Image: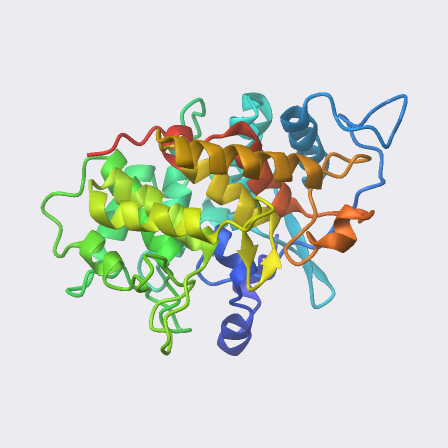
Amino acid sequence: MPTFFTRVAAAALAALTIPALAACSDQPAAPSPQPVPSDSATPGAGAEDPDAPAADPVAAAAAWLTSNLTDATHVEIEYDGDMLADAGATIDVMWALVAAGDLDAAGTVVDWLAQRQVAIDYAGDGQQAAYPSSMGKLALAYLTPGLAPTPEYQSAEALAAGVAGRLKPEGRFRDISEWGDNSTPMGQAFDIMLLVKLGMMDGLAADPVAGLVAVACDDGSYPVMFDTDPPCVGEVETTAVVAQALMAAGEDAAAERAFDYLLAAQTESGRWQNSGTDSVGATSLAVSALALRADPEAADAAALGLQQLKAWQLPRSAAFPGIGAAGGATNAGGTEGDVRATAQAVLGLSLVSYLDLLGVEPR
């Protein structure tokens, strides 16, 4: 099956690197999944009243995700007239299914991810191409508690060793790619979570935590991309994931600043934004990250954000609208669900952080 990564040239990759893709943390970047009409028949929506809220928002959203998988195994996107597999979004859906407790469906998905060609297309062959952001995310998918895939190409441990081998003196994991280096702060955060989980942080050639902290903005946030021109502009989704990685690595001061940024970035309505627009993804990942904190301020912020997430859930499908579609127009009757936004929303609705989901114990 053709994938996006085998079809798009370097110029297109750079142009498609936008905040909406940051939650995927994939290398190279892919366009967001196309919205799926939410008025299609979907398990979990109110049977007697299709406009009634779902009785179990998490289960209903997970059922919608399952119904929108191709062959019950993976996410496909439309690009330039073709349907292409998106492994990064597929991992996001798999994690949502795990958070929702549907391990059978998640197991089917991770078995697809464990196929040799899927893994090579997504993470590289480790020799001519290696994308550490994707390698780390794929390894974490294999290691997700409750699942037991049999990778056909590289095990999670082999992928982690490959990630460690891409660490440069400045503390950055960098790609081998004909398209240049497209690694991201969020991708580095997943790599750090992986190495912490496997006990591989000691003895590295450089310090990836220091390399990540070095790109923090003055307000404690983190940008979508490395090597951006000043001024430094942080982004909620990236910061929410980085905060968890810093917490896992025992970098408490930087993690605290990142969490403080998330609290300060919450709007009066209880939502979080991307590029000035209310965002399901930003709100979801902020809520799930703040669930790690025990202080009352974080708990109150997460509870308010959770209320907003529930209000965004589309009644007919139980899906969630995509980036840029979560403002007043959606609340007034938006009708399209988005795979990536819905997958992120399940984490927020479940109050499940990546550390909890992946079984990563802080150092």
* Labels in figure, total: 0
Left or right for 334, reference 96:
right
Q: Residue at 79% of width from left, 34% of height from top?
A: 315
Name the one closer to the observer, 255 or 9.
255
Q: Residue at x 38, y 52 (%)?
A: 261
* Relative side of 352 to 129, left or right: right
Q: Is residue 132 visible?
A: yes
Q: Position of residue 310 (x, y in %)?
A: 66, 34
Q: Position of residue 102 (x, y in %)?
A: 58, 23
Looking at the picture, does residue 74 appear above or below residue 125? above
In the figure, residue 42 lies in which quadrant?
Answer: top right
Task: Determine if residue 162 is in view.
Answer: no
User: How far across and how far down the image is residue 211, in percent?
Assistant: 22, 60
Q: Quadrant of residue 54?
A: top right
**Picture quadrant of residue 4:** bottom right
Q: What residue is at 39 percent from the left and 63 percent from the top?
A: 223
Query: Which residue is most to the right?
Result: 48
Residue 127 image point, x, y percent: 31, 60
Apparent side of residue 280 relative to residue 40 in the rendered image (left or right): left
Identified at 69% across, 42% down, the residue is: 320
Name the quarter where the C terminus is drawn.
top left
